[in-house]
Every structure is written in C-alpha cells, then in structure tokens.
Image (cartoon, rainbow, N blue to C red):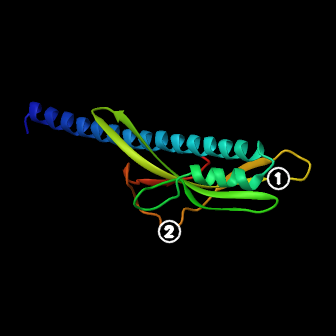
Amino acid sequence: MTRPRALAGILSILLTSALGAGCGGAQDKAVEDAADRARDAATELKQTIGLRLSRSPDHRSAYDGLLAGLPRYTPQRGGLLLRSDLAADQAWFDITVVKTATASGGFSHETRTVRLCAHITVRFPAGQRPASSMTDLNCPGDLAKTDPQLGTIDKVVRLGS
C-alpha cells in the first residue's frame, strides 16, 4: 500500500468516527432536551392544578372545571389526562406529557420525542392550605408508541434526571 493511500484510509476512518460520534451526541442531546421540556411541562401542570384547586373552597366545582380544560388522553388525539379522582381530602391526576426536541452535532440534526407519566396529588388538610405533590408514574403499557402530532416516541423518561 502506498503512503498516500494509507493516509487516506486513516483519515477516512477518523472522519467516519467523528461523524458517528456527532450523531450519537446529537441524539443524546435531543433526548435530554425533550426530557427537560417534559419535566417542565409536568411541573407547570402540577402548579396549575394545585393553584386552581386551592383557590376555590368548592373543590368539586374546581375539579370539574379542571377536567373540562384538561384534554383526556386517547391514542388518536394524544392528550394529558389518563385518569383522575376526587375525594373529600384529596384529588389526584395521572398524566402523560409528550415533548420533542432537536439538537445538532457535527453535521447532523437529530429530533427525538419522549413521554413522561406522573401522578399529581392535591391534598386538602382540614384548616390548612391545600398542598400539591408529584411523583413518577409507570406509564401504562397500553399507551400508543406514537403521538398523533409528534410521531414516534423514542424514550419514556422519569421525573428525576
């Protein structure tokens, strides 16, 4: 093998490795960004639910108003609300959030879509202000693997990093 051919072969291997690393980095960055967006959206929803329920002394009417404004999940339309319930001392909501992000690395752009499922609880302790909390929820296995607006869901993420 001649020296120029050997050098060309080595450069080809290095370039292929660099481009491949850029693609993996872009994919990881897109998943990370989409996960951050999903976590932010879930946190915002928890705060909205908590505020709406805490501002009204009539928890039933506030709960019904929230249900009217939260799109119920269906495989055809997507949506946020999986299920919910109201009791005398608390309300809870199981939600799913789907978000997407695009990142670039090297010569490529990668778009990734993630799903996050969470359980939001708002407690109404007697004589105290209502308090809301949110915990991870294992996404039900029957959720569609695609979102009608955002396409294929690449990864299910959790609240924690």
Residue 98: x and y in percent read: 48, 50
Of helix, strand and loop, which one carries label 2?
loop
Snapshot quadrant of residue 25: top left
Of helix, strand and loop, which one carries label 1?
loop
How many neighbours does mark 1 have within 10 angstroms: few (below 14), some (14-19), or many (20 or more)? some
Residue for point 74% across, 48% down: 132
Q: Which residue is mark 1?
A: 124
Residue for point 48% across, 42% down: 32
Distance of mark 1 from mark 2, alpha carbons?
31 Å
Residue 146: x and y in percent read: 38, 57
Q: Amino acid at mark 2?
A: Gly
Snapshot quadrant of residue 5: top left
Q: Which residue is mark 2?
A: 141
Quick one: label 1 or label 2, which is nearer the N terminus?
A: 1
Point out the image quarter for the C terminus. top right
Outermost residue toward the bottom in this view: 142
Q: Amino acid at mark 1?
A: Phe
Snapshot quadrant of residue 18: top left
Q: Nearer the viewer, mark 1 or mark 2?
A: 1
- Judge from the rendering whether residue 11 lies leftward or rightward of residue 149; answer left or right: left
Q: Is residue 53 above or below residue 108?
A: below
- Judge from the rendering whether residue 45 lies leftward or rightward of residue 33; answer left or right: right
On the question of residue 98 being in view, the answer is yes
Residue for point 77% across, 58% down: 90
- Judge from the rendering whether residue 147 lies leftward or rightward of residue 129; answer left or right: left
How many neighbours does mark 2 have within 10 angstroms: few (below 14), some (14-19), or many (20 or more)? few
Residue 42: x and y in percent read: 59, 46
- Judge from the rendering whether residue 93 lies leftward or rightward of residue 125; answer left or right: left
Q: Closest to the observer: 75 or 13?
A: 75
Q: Are marks 1 and 2 in contact (CB under 8 Å)?
A: no
Q: Closest to the observer: 92 or 143?
A: 92
Q: Is residue 3 above or below residue 68?
A: above
